[in-house]
Amino acid sequence: MSTKLIERTPSAYGYPLLIKHILHTPLRCAQIIYRDIKRYDYVTLNKRIGQFANVLQDLGLKAGDTVGVLDFDSHRYLECFFAVPMMGAILHTVNWRLSPEQVLYTINHAEDDILLVHSDFLPLVEKLRGAMKTVKSIIVLTDNGPVPETNFEVAGEYEALVDKSPSDFDFPDFDENSRATTFYTTGTTGAPKGVYFSHRQLMLHTLAVMASFAQSSEGGLCAKDVYMPLTPMFHVHAWGFPYVATMLGIKQVYPGRYAPDTLLGLIAKEGVTYSHCVPTILHMLLASPAAAAVDLSALRITIGGSALSMGLCKAARQRGINITTGYGMSETCPVLTIANLRPHMLEWSEEEQLDVRCRTGQPIPFVDVRVVDPGGREIPHDGTAVGEVVVRAPWLTQGYLKETERSEDLWADGWLHTADVGSIDTDGYLRVTDRMKDVIKTGGEWISSLQIEDILTRHPAVSEATVIGVSDEAWGERPYAMVVIKEEHKGKVSPEDLKLFFQGFVTQGLISKWSVPDKVALVDFIPKTSVGKQDKKAIRQKVKELNNPAALKQ
């Protein structure tokens, strides 16, 4: 195809899509807050970003170098989100919840040059320092008090270094396709995989997420909102929302280490109106005794990372929370869809609205989502036909860092393969029904583990539930459920009671009789990954132990 490019005046400014341009628009009166430790306005944010850039430059950081960060959600992390990529360097958000061996692997694989380490993680770094191949300097982050003694040399403490550094820094222009960030996925097998994103991708993702809130019938993010992340900032840039909040110039609250009382206290004190998290965090907040004294009716939450069950959604709505589901993954920057209610849906019953809120959602602007059969052919949008979810968008990782073969598998046929199974209904809402590896295949029928989990959480005595497929000689696989009972119902509900609970759904034709789990095990906890998702690998191991007492003695 022959196209005609626009004519560009030699003196015209090309305006590359760089993260530094986000800082051109914020309102100057809004505040950045870190617990009860730090509070300042956007003017100071700009100043501190320049100061920190000068600190990094004095330590020898150059364009193309990498800065790793091990910190809780803080104002410091927000400053790193800007200063590091704005210098042309790469921000590596280190997942400190990984095993020590995996943390070391990601630091070496990303080739970190400078490491920022919260004092709580100094014991971990002391063990790993000798095996770090590329780290030249370490900056310590403290909330209060002096830098603890360490067995390695540090460049200094973050606040002390920033305070004595000048604020003027000339952030250069460069190619908008330059890598800005690196993050490692938390796979259940093999070494973590590195995904990476450019300035252009992060800018377009920010704009599209903002636009998606404008499409909401229940109100979007605006100047009066107060934002607080409940997704770790090391996990896909806290889903990109710190960039959105900064572009909007709204008040931002950073909670540090997650603890229910602290989070609920900040929501009440600072008037938090928007957040996002995995279901585990929301469950933790609602289950906290402190939640009873906090008004949550002004709070809007987007749930992602795992499916939002009907039971948890209903519990949130009973507290007045405006809750919706979002969908994405580490490889997708991450937001792909959000389950906004359409205007006519506001007239629906609460039960009908709950169903929409628990759907995976409609694509946000610039996202092309398809569901395809094993041959790659798109299947009908009838809400029934299921296949693999594949996507295209301007902000998807272009591969796995230094892993050519895995990258080609990810991008087979020019579509990013999510390895999720789902369907699209006539209204254009995607509903993810399972991970491809978690679908239970029984007697030739596919059973959704997520659907069974959702039904279990509707039982008033159930706090959490997980379902996997276990081998069966006759049927190939059969569903096996593990359930955590609410404290006030313990001893009053049996596994047989929970199996009987399914009969109403079978009678209504909502599920087949083959979907009822053969066994329901009552457990004290369900294993989670480092980012709060159900850890199906650990769950399968736990099932083996529950069904093989001898394994517990080995």
Image (tube, helix red, strand yellow):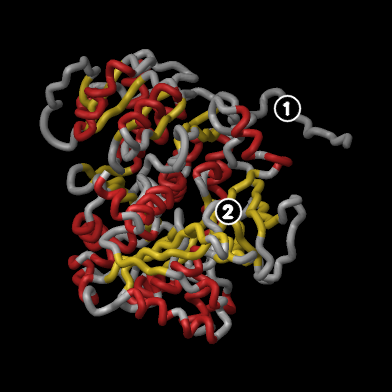
Q: Amino acid at mark 2?
A: Met
The quarter of the image holding the N terminus is: top right
Q: Residue 388 is drawn in which quadrant?
A: bottom right
Q: Is residue 246 above or below residue 59?
A: below
Q: Secondary structure at mark 1?
A: loop
Q: Amino acid at mark 1?
A: Thr
Residue 65 location (% of width, % of height):
45, 19
Asked whether, in this view, residue 338 is left or right of residue 543, the answer is: right
What distance separates the C-alpha of mark 2 from that of mark 1? 52 Å
Which residue is at a point 44% across and 72% down the rendered structure image? 310
Residue 20 seen by the camera? no
Number of residues whose C-alpha sits closer than 10 Å to that of mark 1, classed few (under 14), some (14–19) or many (20 or more): few
Mark number for residue 436? Answer: 2
Residue 541 location (% of width, % of height):
38, 50
Which residue is at a point 55% across and 52% down the rendered structure image? 437
Q: Secondary structure at mark 2?
A: loop
Residue identifier under label 1: 9
Which residue is at a point 50% across and 64% down the rendered structure image? 478
Q: Earlier in the sequence, mark 2 or mark 1?
A: 1
**What is the number of callouts on the image?**
2
Q: Is residue 237 above or below residue 213?
A: above
Q: Residue furthest right?
A: 2
Q: Closer to the camera: disc 2 or disc 1?
A: 2
Number of residues whose C-alpha sits closer than 10 Å to that of mark 2, classed few (under 14), some (14–19) or many (20 or more): some
Residue 398 seen by the camera? yes
Give whichever of 286, 13 is nearer the camera.
286
Q: Is residue 304 above or below residue 207?
A: below
Give whichever of 212, 291 is nearer the camera.
291
